[in-house]
Amino acid sequence: MKAVIIGKDRKLQLACVPSPEPRPDQVLIDIRAAGVNRADLLQVDGKYPPPPGWPDWPGLECAGVVAEAPAGSRFRKGDKVCALLGGGGYAEQVAVPEMLVMPLPENCSFAEGAALPEVFATAYLNLTEVGRLRAGETLFMQAGASGLGLAVIQLAKQLGAKVVTTVGSEAKAEAVRAAGADVVIDRKRENVPEALKRCKPDVAIDCVGGPLLESCLEAMNRGGRWIIIATLGGPEVSVSLRTFMQLHVSLIGSTLRSRTNEQKGEILRQLEGRVWPLIAAGKVRPSIHQVLPLEEAETAHAILREQANIGKVILTLPEGNC
């Protein structure tokens, strides 16, 4: 089959690779679309290898059609599905443990379905299990116009929270307001920590980290939960322990990829039960910036590296490839 692999020059290239041979507990999916994530860029850079047992090529989420299913599975050949992956989404097929596969929500295209598993699982996990966000609280989301940011904003509003977020342009500000953000901070024009003091958050989902972390923590409400999910602004920070003592705040590290398949599967079951009906009803929707063919994966990565996207970038494959 065809897949987009990482070449010796660390460039993405289309190549022929062996087709997957599913284990008895795996669903074989003919991929129609794959989501592009910043973790894929880190993998290309040699900083984020796939977990054992997954393909070497990138791709953390996909949507497509079931080609084979285990005996006794709830899925049947021909079912439309989406799946959370440890890797391998940039290809014509992938074999996935059944617990990581979900039915495609009603009224969703394959491209929209491929924009769901990674970001909505991450959003749901950190808003509910990790952040314990409650109705009436204030959520702060860094980089609100990203695919993850727009998912977080929508789910937080459904949970009854006030949402504060940062953006880097007026176009992105319009997008986050449309998604439901109550307060929008232009990080290029405003002092983010000072702006936060005017709308103190109870929960923060931070993909930036970096030198602003300490002053942002000081702006939290007493008992706040600050969740680090990535370190785009740098992995090293200086934080005064007095902040934790005086404000009773928690600094929490959280990643989805490092969790077991069983833990991920439980998150996906909750997504399917609680969020899929919201998607089917049009109350929550995946946000797509651009759809490109699989062979243009390098262009897709460039869009994310330049932070030019508002929402998800999706790679698609025509029917009948597999």
Image (spheres, rainbow, N blue to C red):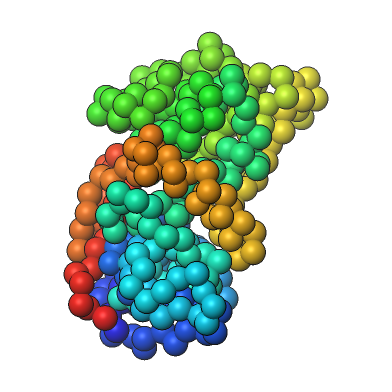
Give coordinates of residue 283: x percent, y percent: 38, 34
Q: Is residue 90 visible?
A: no
Give coordinates of residue 271: x percent, y percent: 52, 49
> Residue 99 occupies which quadrant of the picture?
bottom right
Left or right: residue 8 versus residue 231 is left
Give coordinates of residue 120: x percent, y percent: 47, 47
> Residue 238 occupies which quadrant of the picture?
top right
Q: How many marks?
A: 0
Q: Residue at x 43, y 19 (%)?
A: 182
Up-down relation of residue 3 to residue 204 (above or below): below
Q: Is residue 279 visible?
A: yes
Up-down relation of residue 154 to residue 121 (above or below): above
Q: Residue at x 19, y 69 (%)?
A: 318
Up-down relation of residue 42 to residue 123 (above or below): below
Give coordinates of residue 23: x percent, y percent: 52, 84
Q: Residue at x 77, y 25 (%)?
A: 248
